[in-house]
Image: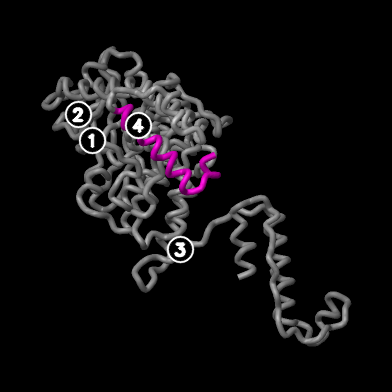
Amino acid sequence: MAAQMNDNQATILEEALTRFVDVWLQGEPPDIDEFVGQYPEYETQLKERIQDLEEIDSLFDSLVKTDESDFEGAVTLQSLVGHKIGNFEIVEIIGRGGMGVVYLAHDTKLDRSVAFKSIPHNLAGDATAKMRFRREAKLLASLNHPNIATIHDIIEQDETADYIILEYVPGETLAQRIAREPMGLKEALSIGQQVAEAVSAAHEKSIVHRDLKPGNTMITPEGKVKVLDFGLAKATSNQNRNQATTVTQPGRIMGTPAYMSPEQERGKETDHRTDIWSFGCILYEMLTGRLPFEGETATDMLARIIEQQPDWELLPQETPTNIRTLLRRCLEKDPRQRLRDIGDAGIEIKESLAMPATASGSRAAAPVRTRWPRAIAIGLVVGAIVLLLTVVGLDSGRWREKLLGEASPGQIKSLAVLPLANLTGDPNQEYFAEGMTE
């Protein structure tokens, strides 16, 4: 419906929603029927969007409670620093969050540094937390990719203590790198390519991360990317790759608000496309230095994710066309319209990095990759050959007569290429029909 509006109508609708949200955030939700009555032409659209906002509000309480619980769990932990567990000497805390505390430890047996992850003390006896913790270990064990942190072992010491031994990755998080200084295009694309390849490897194993963000991505001093923290990850069925399957109860929000997909923030079932949305948010933030959706409060941010588009004008001028298109496809609010395979994102970025820079320092746009059905490809090749024969005029030596059984016409002095129609039904072929007439 919104797509059928003109700019003026869309502006009026956005202003109406902004008014509603402003009053709503002050703790005094307006009467919906009375409010909508002020905009009779937009009654249906307004009610649909207000319903979305109310759904977010009802779920936000659980999100706040989860965040508070996570924060409390991280702060009230019983520090293991100075202790020795098995052959691991705990040195210092290097990361903490609601789903676990990560220490730097020394493996005395193999004489190496490792990351030592434990469940927060207040969750140690929680069956669900322990299940997620052990599941993370098993999921990581099934992955083998240079851009995913490796698991070494899991220690199940007793009923209240589980520990995961992970590869120690020195360096800084992507969040720290973004905050430090603006990124150049090449660096952002290089990191984006590695993240996409890591997530693609997980998806190939039917594993969805569900908490992809800069804070869960490490960058080594050499520029190597490692995706961390699969604590919220889930396994999906290969037979139902396009159907969401989850162990999370409907209505339960899991993830970080700024990078959550619209379906994830609503507590709906999710699949691999939620990671593609998060990846789009990360790539946008690396290129612009800002989140695609910002707000003074988490509720405000979630509302913007539902209602608004990122400011595409913030993208650097030298951003290649195919990367701009990739971002739009990753950040489609409807998962059915979103990029289907994050592996394609890695390929697009790789092609952009391989393109030579223009005189202005920007990179030429990479060609659009299109997977054509065999019949279409053959038809295009045959059509191109016929066109070539016509244009070049291979009538000399009676080639036309030999090939087509016709007498050679007079010399062609001009050629008109009439508008071509795209009969494939694939919008990706539209540029071919247009380009032939230019």
- What residue did someone put label 3 on? 365
- What residue did someone put label 2 on? 88
Kindly identify the residue that appears in the image at 26 percent across and 17 percent down.
123
Counting residues from the start of the chain, the first of labels 1 and 2 encountered is 2
Kindly identify the residue that appears in the image at 33 percent across and 33 percent down.
257
Q: Is residue 430 above or below residue 438?
A: above
Q: Nearer the viewer, residue 181 or 128?
A: 181
Quick one: SS at disc 3? loop
At label 2, which amino acid type do we have?
A: Phe
Disc 1 vs disc 2: Cβ atoms closer than 8 Å?
A: yes
Front tag of 2 and 4: 4
**Can residue 349 be seen by looking at this rendering?**
yes
Magenta segment range? 1-25
Q: Nearer the viewer, residue 8 or 160?
A: 8
Counting residues from the start of the chain, the first of labels 3 and 1 encountered is 1
- What residue did someone put label 4 on? 21
At label 4, which amino acid type do we have?
A: Val
